[in-house]
Amino acid sequence: MNKQQLAAKIWESANKMRSKIEANEYKDYILGFIFYKFLSEKEVKYLKNNDWTNEYLPELKEEDEETVISIQKNLGYFISYENLFSTWLSKGKDFSVQDVHDALSAFSRLINPTHKKVFDGIFNTLQTGLSKLGDSAASQSKSISDLIYLIKDIPMDGKQGYDVLGFIYEYLIEKFAANAGKKAGEFYTPHEVSLLMSEIVAEHLKNREKIEIFDPTSGSASLLINIGKSASKYIEGKNKIKYYAQELKQNTYNLTRMNLVMRGIEADNIVTRNGDTLEDDWPYFDENDPIVTYNPLYVDAVVSNPPYSQGWNPSDKETDPRYAGYGLAPKGKADYAFLLHDLYHIKPDGIMNIVLPHGVLFRGGEEGEIRKNLIEKNKIDTIIGLPANIFYGTGIPTIVMVLKQKRVNTDVLIIDASKGFVKEGKNNKLRASDIKKIVDVVTRRECVEKFSRVVSRDEIRRNDYNLNISRYVDSSEKAESWDIYASMFGGLPISEINDLKEYWTAFPKLKTALLEKTEGEYSRIVVTDIKKAVKENECVQAFEQSFKNAFGNFDDYLYNELIEKMDTLGISKTEEVLSLDIFARLKDIHLVDKYEAYQLLDDDWTKIAIDLEIIQTEGFEATKVVDPNMVVKKKGNLEQEVQEGWKGRIIPFDLVQNTLLLDEKQEIQKKENRLSEITSKYEELFDMLTEEEKEADFVNENSFVFAEIKKALKNKDIEVETKKKLKEVEALNTEEKELKSEVKKESALLEEKTKETIESLSDEQVRQLLKEKWIHPLIKNLMQLPDRIVSELVDKLKALAKKYETTFAEIESQIEETEKELSLMIDDLEAGEFDMRGLYEFKKLLGGE
């Protein structure tokens, strides 16, 4: 089930539930049941890996103490057969709300004592809220039954390439924003922002054998999960990352634990706490030690997206080691309290990322003092300005601040990334290329015009420790100006021609081929066809050829990396490998934005990665599997899922038809083209009808009524010309019916033949089809980059030429000519006395006699 199908199902269910529970509460129920399903399936999978079969599963009972202890030891919990999610489903109409109550109570009772912190109370919200799902046990049972049938097909194996719980949570927050209130958006960090922070952290921690990461405002745990995923690219082996999470709200704390467990993280590597981060800092207590010892928690990385500008109580915090030496955040804005808390918990060689509102960069008072101390103590490493409208629930622009305990350099890297995004509905979204560019700049500490600057501490001191991004990085577009001389006398200002200097540098002979200097600081275009002159220029053609040469063997490279290694390649690492190869090929190619090329790669990689996951999970034979194509159709007031043909699990039907079955497809297309011609011919014949014919019964408002045409042709009194037109329409209609019947029949046969073809593909045919699906679209898109660059130059030159094409003097002359013509026209007019007096006065204004 893909994201779109999952979202559609959840939204449908949520609408049905609206009469019973608040929309915002719905997520607590659905997420709770999804997690219980996951735990049930995980236990069954464990048992089957240990020689249990389906016929023995009914023997899975609490009374079997040895089995219970074994499962608890390995999984941290135990669920008996009668309480499995699959057992609930098998009960059908016999299922009741009491089954859920019994199961959740048993789960709580049978948690392994060493895993209490991970699982204890995790279903409290679900257990206590079941009564809200109906007025009676029967109605509650019906509501729960609907929910569990909804989620029975939701994937639980962690192979989806996306955070299932996090996606559902984000989707519901977006859909229920009006009911949930803006604060709901505080808990979920959009995947793209999470990924940006994760890549920065992973780059800093790469090649360490083990790491510990901490999120003190963990929400759905998406930040921790993404950091783990990014960091794992550089760590050999599994379960080398320990996750610490603290969350204030009980419901959200449960979500933290659920999500971490669902992502396949071992329970021993999950340490969570339900508490107030600012009021009750998290020391580490050794609970097995009779003499309780206290050690502060120090980790390799802290990440957080705390609630913005939240109130807090700074009273009696002066001696708190987290804030000592920096100052206390003001009572009404806890932003710096969260930041200092995070900073305190990182090791000397650690790193922290925190999302905050822009105000922390320039607000004065206590915050100004804290900011000054952070700069003087050399803790602030990087500031990244994000686009506005990137978070659910708030449109305010935000920043990511990167801090470290120990730094060699004393400057601050400031990045204005506010312009790089794509619009999605009401929100803005970072693209993969935007994230890649930011991470590269952070890693290399690069200065990029209108994007980033490394700012010295002395400069920040001179600005009184104000870190407002616009003071240091000007990302604004150059305002359009008009040259007065060129506006009056024509010509192109050399200053504006020089704005295209990157093109003149890349194409050194192009400028002189297109332009010649006139007088002063002005030039003129000397070619009549700008596009032709640019395209045929030897420098431009050399540029296009050098690009082709750079990617000359790229298809072979991709075939080797993707298809030859499809069974064993590391999916999470391969995109980076391919991007490095693309960047290397583009190293000496001017004008081509390597991040634009990276975006093309990422657009295709998303689909390729899904195919690779299936192949690595199910085996190569999955490429030859055809599945029912299930669609949701409305029948009356009900929507139901029905089969509508077939689809290849990996190999698309269209791809097979366009390659291996092209003759059959083209035959159908010919007939479909003829059907389109017939439709056009109907319109043409309808337009030829006389007004009298259009009043006849054989036409309605704008089309023919074919049944009435037959009757009209039997009428002996029909006009000869009318009869001729109607006979042509009737012949077309007969042909149309035959063609539609043939197309329907042949399409069904082609679909069946496609199914059979996919199922009987040879291994070599599969590899060639995967090459068509994965490699050719990417190469085709990359090959269009040079042409796009050249076209942009042509458009800019044409716009510049048009800008000064007509001088003010010519415009003035045109106005004078128009006034003269209008004056002469007034002389030819005849009107009453007062009208004529008015017209003559108007003529004086025009400059007439």
Image (spheres, helix red, strand yellow):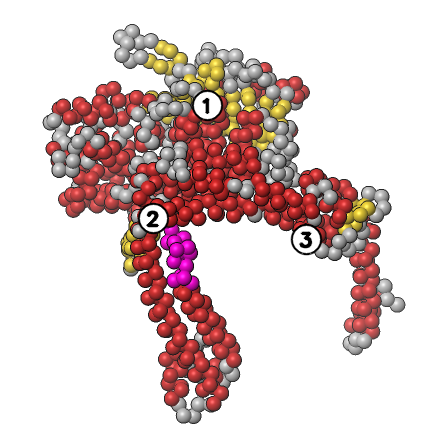
List the residue tagged with mark 3.
Answer: 531
Q: Looking at the image, do the residues carrying marks 3 and 1 touch, with CB atoms under 8 Å apart? A: no
Farthest bottom residue in view: 717
Farthest right residue in view: 849
- Magenta span main SS: helix
On residue 762, the disc is: 2
Disc tally is 3
Q: Quadrant of the N terminus?
A: top left
**At 42% from the left edge and 68% from the top edge, which residue is drawn?**
671
Work out whether residue 221 or residue 129 is closer to the camera in this orientation and state it: 221
- Relative horizontal placement of residue 478, taking residue 292 as reference (left or right): right
Farthest top residue in view: 291
CA separation in Å, label 3 and label 1: 49 Å
The residue tagged with tag 2: helix, strand or loop? Answer: loop
x, y (%) of residue 6? 34, 44
x, y (%) of residue 704? 43, 77
Q: Which residues are magenta?
A: 650-666
Query: What is the crowding at mark 1: few (fewer than 14 residues within 10 Å), some, or many (at least 20)?
Result: some
**At 40% from the left edge and 92% from the top edge, which residue is drawn?**
716
Work out whether residue 97 or residue 118 is closer to the camera in this orientation and state it: 118
x, y (%) of residue 760? 31, 51
Pair 2/3: label in front: 2
List the residue tagged with mark 1.
Answer: 206
